[in-house]
Image (tube, rainbow, N blue to C red):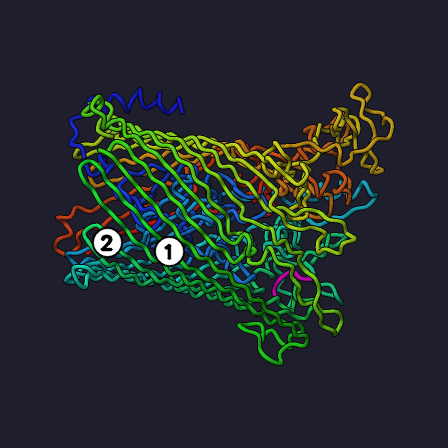
Amino acid sequence: MNVKLKVLSAGALFFLAQGINAQVDTTKVRNIDEVVVVGYGTQRKGDVTSAVSTVKGEAIANLNTPTFEAQLAGRSSGVQVVNNSGEIGRAPVVRIRGINSISSGTSPLYVIDGIPMFAGDTGGGNTAANALADINPSDIEDMTVLKDGAATAIYGSRAANGVILITTKKGRGGKFSVQYNNQFSVANVVKKIDLLQTPDFLTISNEKAAANGTTWARGSEYNSDWQNAVLRTGTQMDHFLSLTGGLGKGNYYASLGYTTQEGVIVPNSMERLSVRLNADQKVTDWLKLSTSVAYSETGYSGLNNGVNSISGAMFSAVRQHPNVPIYNPATPTGYNIYTAGTVSRVGQWDNLIPITSDLTNIAYVVRNNKYTSDLSRFIGSVAGDVKLTSWLDYRIQLSKDRSVTTGFLYWNRVHGDGYSRQGYINNNYLNMDRWNIQNILNFQKSFDRHKFNLVLVNEYQKQQANSFYADGQGLSADFFGAENVISGSYTTQYSGGAFSENGLISYAARLSYSFANKYFLQGTIRRDGLSSLPEANKWGNFPGLSLGWTVSNEEFLKDNEVISELKLRASYGKVGNTQIGNYPYLGLYSSYKYADYTGIGYSQAGNDQLQWETSTKKNIGADLGFFNRRLTLSADYFINENDGLILAVPVSPSLGVPNNAINKNIGAMKNEGFEFVANADLVRSEDFTWSLGGNLTLMKNEVQSLVGGNDIIESQNNQTAYLIREGESLRSLYGFKYWGVNMANGNPVYYKADGSLVQGNIADGIYYVYDSANPGTLGPKSSLANADRYILGNTLPTYFGSLNTNLTYKNLDLGVMVRFSGGNSIFNVSRRELLNQDFYNNGTEILGRWQSASNPGDGWTPKLWGTRGNFINLEGVVNSRFVEKGDFVKIDNITLGYTINPNILESINLSKLRIYGVVQNAFMFTNYTGIDPEMESTGMDYNSVPRQRTISLGLNATF
């Protein structure tokens, strides 16, 4: 932070102090009177005493992302957004002030125009479909992030992971206005994996085989690029039309949007049609009616990208042999496919043996298998505002969020996953329905220098989800795999379904008091009753308290020419987490099938003492403004203490309890950190403006309590990777510590827990003591056991933030945002897999392998030995050889626009026309050797779809 302040003091403060002959735009500089959206209402920004941040819709209007929460990346302190895949439909990971649960949900609560929304994946299981992508980003007026306990307590049991409030655009009285936005984009992968070309592939493959006294690879006619066979240049188009205006005592806003996006991997795509109508009408002097209705239809085409799946697109593409062709006109399919008996795989061509695991021709698979999800989404509300007196208002709002998904899957019977089944087909249906009713009383009273505001809330919510599926195999013809399950077209039939529901009843109050616009006090209390908890613990109370002192309004600072604002804040709040499932406390029986018989079996052990997971949030902060707020600074220190976290407590197997565990409220964890925000209007003159801003978050996570203080070791993607230990960061990478290569014989060398060294002798698969003074001799037999594992790094960033600058010169504008993050480690499984010892292709790193004592290579890559990759690379566990720092700096967005002179547009009845270009994910600076350090899931990078760089051209026209 000191570096930033020095930069400002050297340049910005000089300009600010001098004034630069500028006509200051007070609507932008003196924004202390802006209205900020808070839970169940609004507040004047100057009255806010809690930690909130607002992102204006205009800041994200021209960014090309299928979902609005992805656009939050870098735009708010304390908010980390990780887009870990280039697959369209895959939801980004959003964390507000860290992770606040060990085993339950960690996503924020999203509220759009007062309606709590469904979030997460609603794709029905066939392809990823992010529920939030049903909202057109162009409809968003602003997004407000509630971060601390005082701000989130008004949402009580649902607010442990923070709250994001979305306000859509509303009608404005006056002249009728039409706006049309059009954007065309081209997307390419930022980076591909460096794979061996045919000459090196032949050398490496036969060096692997030579260790077993044989030869694998032959033929150099082809040098196929299998990544290009599944990756592509994606084109994207977005049309958006909005109408706004007023009629009499009413206002309206209507919009129509149409978006198509091709992903960078075949056949991934999205198509969305969205409509919205927001209207309000003042019926009498005391009654106003309003409605907000949105409907969208979104279609996704996806693919199998299983990280360890034979038909996973990236898994397969990087392993295919470059010396064989992708296509073969001599086959009926036109692809290089070998089929015999029960085997169907990519043709081996001139190679002496087939590819390991009988990998399929992935180019054929991605073009002939189908994974689709079609979603219909309705989000609507009707509200009435009644002005009972000059100081008392009543509002009732009824809302509904309904998402209906139809999924379809077809595995082609000719080749790939469906070959052994003679074709496989699946239809599924998922209906998610949520009703919400809110009653709100709003008291506002001022006298002398006292100002009171009391908000009372009563809320009811109920949601249901029901699903069913039908599938089968043994299709009579490919024709029946086109669109839907067709009766009588397949031999083996299956079906199934599920139903779940839960409800919430809430009572809340928020009292805000200020004196002389100097001293502020706000208290909140919410009482929630949740059906997901047992009767004795169904109700919970969630308080919040915040204090504020605007020092700059005191006489000794009033009208100070340098310090225009100084405000001190402190807050406390206790909130909960409802993302614990629908029936976690019940002892459950489920249906089971045995042979041709159906029955019921014990499936979940109940716990009638189960309670809320709670999060106690504390915050102190300060806001400063200088030179009539030309320079603003904010700083916050926060502690989130999460208690009563639900963990699985082991029980004796003799009890017959499912999974040998019972869920109890035992865990505890803490997030602690600092947030800094700085913004400066460096230059603001008639022809030229320049603003600079940035934010920085420093954060530390610590697990404080586990079951009996015992470690938890977790796996992901068949990789035993994580340690949860008291006193450590959540899910630290846990595995073996690599020393390097024994230069005498090419064996890998590791540290044991006591610091001594052992070498894994590749020839016999046994560990021996390594003596660096005598490396050519195998020492006594030893071991590399679970007890020799180390903590190899934390998976959560310890710092992240952004810098942004905006310049305008007359009608030209330029905006740049730079994001950064670091302090975390990543287990680069993709890199390890590219060093495999099977008859697959490899990454170029393998060229640094040990070949002899006189040619020891890079000292890091052991000698090759075919089929012994599990021993050489320690597959299935973390190895520090493949653990890397995840630090990066990205020039994330570059926007250049030009606004046509309005005088030129008058003749064609246009009031505004802006033409612009945007580059997203433009440049990256990192030492990480993978494609992108953000392509990690819980600290693991494993065969994700590469992220894309997007270049867009667009126009905004207003009539």
Q: Residues within 10 Å of mark 1 (few under 14, many from 20)?
A: some
Looking at the image, the residue that sits furthest to the bottom is: 488
The number of discs equals 2
Q: Earlier in the sequence, mark 2 or mark 1?
A: 1
Observer-nearest residue: 740 or 60? 60
Of badges 2 and 1, the one in the foreground is 1
Residue type of the residue flagged with mark 2: Ala
Q: Is residue 240 above or below residue 209?
A: below
Between marks 2 and 1, how big is the CA–CA gap? 43 Å
Residue ID for mark 2: 957
Looking at the rendered structure, the kind of residue marked 1 is Asn
Q: Quadrant of residue 242?
A: bottom left
Would residue 334 be counted in the magenta stretch? yes
Q: Position of residue 811 (x, y in %)?
A: 21, 41
Q: Which residues are magenta?
A: 333-338
State whether residue 211 appears in this view.
Answer: yes
| Residue that extends furthest to the right in the rendered view of this protein | 780
